Image (cartoon, grey):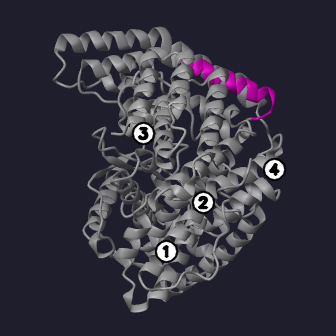
Amino acid sequence: MSLMRKTALAAAALFVATGASAMEQEAFDKAFDAIPKKGAEAKLEALQDLRYQWLMESFPSRATYQGYAGVNDRWMDASLEGIKRRREQTRRMLAASRHIEADELPEPLQLDHQLLYQDLLTEVKGFQFPEHLLPVTHMSGIQRNVPGVLAAMPKRNASDYDDILVRLDRLPLLVQQIRTLMEEGLEKQITPPQITLRDLPVQMRALIPEDPSESPLMKAFAEMPSSISASQQKRLRNRAFALYHRELVPAWRDLAEFVEREYIPGARVDTAFTSMPDGTRWYAHKVRDNTTTALSAEEIHRIGLEEVKRIRGEMEKIIAKTGFEGDFAAFTDFLRNDPQFYHTSREDLMRDYRDIAKRIDGELPKLFRALPRLPYGVKRIPSYSEKSQTTAYYQPGSMEAGRAGVFFANTYNLASRPKWEMEALTVHEAMPGHHLQIALAQEIEDVHPLRRLSMYTAFVEGWGLYSESLGYDLGLYTDPYSEFGALTYDMWRAVRLVVDTGMHQLGWSREQAIEYFMNNSAKPRHDITVEIDRYLVWPGQALAYKLGQLKIKDLRANAEEQLGNNFDIRSFHDELLGAGALPLNVLEGRMNDWIVAQGGQAATAPTSESADPVAPI
């Protein structure tokens, strides 16, 4: 370990030891001042060390998921002072990254520098917008995050449980900090759309049932490891339940009442993100940040319309193949409502998801040489969030934390969970989609740990959507309904380009977006409504999927054309995933270099615009 890395790690240890805001600043100053003044490699390594430690210490929940030790008794400082402090620290790291002589770095480290600089620059550009005043939506926020973090915490011994208890004891302060941000947002009319907040009080109250043993906050104390004696278990459980009644229930109840009585009635009625102060520029920033391209909302809208038209043509061919007598609307109505396409029990639905996952796993070597060591599981979305949650999601695992990845599937309202969507969904969320890509990124050797944290949405979700097209090679989509389901999922992401930009940039109403989705997809209305509300509270995020997929498909088509018979799909996939998640502009350059190294020619012109990685602030 280099002297610089030892210095940064030692300074960062102060973060853990103190837990006080003033000392966090002092520790940061010491680590920052220890960055060498000369030597590009030494500067970069020290700054990467500081950035990694800063992320783990400043965002302890993220550290828990990562398996990073020492901060499991803390929450993020969500106070206005804490936010201001982190922003200033980020600006200082950006300034330091500018003083690294990139041309003096070896080629692999030039990529490290480019990514570090681009990430810091994007983050600092975002500071001009009050994102911190939107801390809670029906899709995200402490009512969703806290139970997940507590579930991910180590539970091996009494010391681990002491960390959980300290974290629980500090939770009311976090709740109050979040409320303060919400109150300021309410005053400035910076809130989620009112229509999306309807389930928020229910989500919060679901955390505080009368019986603490039924609370997601107390789940760790329901079944404790045998390494803890019975007397210790009783002591820990009694402390937790006392804390629950004395501190946690009042804190969450007060927040739920505030949301119900003040926040929802006062929230903005207009659903367009651009209706908020400086919303047009803010939305443009979100579009660039999520897509890692310079495409405008209008350009993305046009791409979406073209994709919807193309996929609709493919769907019409499938309908003809089935021999169905009726038009597109009649066919999608048939898929939505015929009982043959739906399970009658949650257990059967989950069994079939696990069966699909197992069948996929055995086919993966056809398409990949490199496969992750970390396993994954298939679980139900927790009941306290399932009603307003999307169809499925993936939660990364961690070898350091001893936790497998998880594909979470929604079993709420079985009449909205058709069988024909299950194969495409499993491919996307599990293998070879999110689990394969994210687990491989975590296992990359000889790179800085900071690189393994990268989660560029356009790459990660673009890969997930591209993976759906690999289902044919994996022996899936053998019946026309599952094939139509795969096209429905592709259409789903194309529709996103149209409705997200439509609602936030072009004046579309929520209902107009729902009807457009209904008219071009077989997905049930409940699913579609949940999706539209997701786009309302996460503007721009849903654009990343289709744009990332199109980029990967373009790169593959170019590689196939350039390399001809020398093209190897396994080598292409391994190279594409080999550096972890990357911004699309960086990915394109990397894959063009690989094509040249394989004997082909680089693309004569870039197929996406630069994400402006070196633009001045």
Q: Which residues are magenta?
A: 173-190
* Amino acid type for the residue under numbered disc 1: Asp
* Amino acid type for the residue under numbered disc 4: Thr
Q: CA distance from mark 4 to mark 2?
A: 19 Å
Is residue 290 within the magenta segment? Answer: no
Q: CA distance from mark 1 to mark 3?
A: 44 Å
Judging by the rendered image, the residue that carries numbered circle 2 is 544
Q: Quadrant of residue 153?
A: top left
Of helix, strand and loop, which one carries label 1?
A: helix
Front: mark 1 or 2: 1
* Amino acid type for the residue under numbered disc 3: Pro
Of helix, strand and loop, which one carries label 3?
A: loop
**Labelled pair 1, 2 in contact (Cβ < 8 Å):** no
In depth, the one of 309 and 292 nearer the eye is 292
Front: mark 4 or 3: 4
Judging by the rendered image, the residue that carries numbered circle 3 is 382
Work out whether mark 4 precedes mark 2 in sequence or the reverse, and give the earlier one: 4
Residue located farthest toward the front when viewing the structure as drawn: 38
Count residues near mark 4 (Cα–Cα under 10 Å), then give few for <14, some for 14-19, many for 20+: some
Count residues near mark 3 (Cα–Cα under 10 Å), then give few for <14, some for 14-19, many for 20+: some
Judging by the rendered image, the residue that carries numbered circle 4 is 280
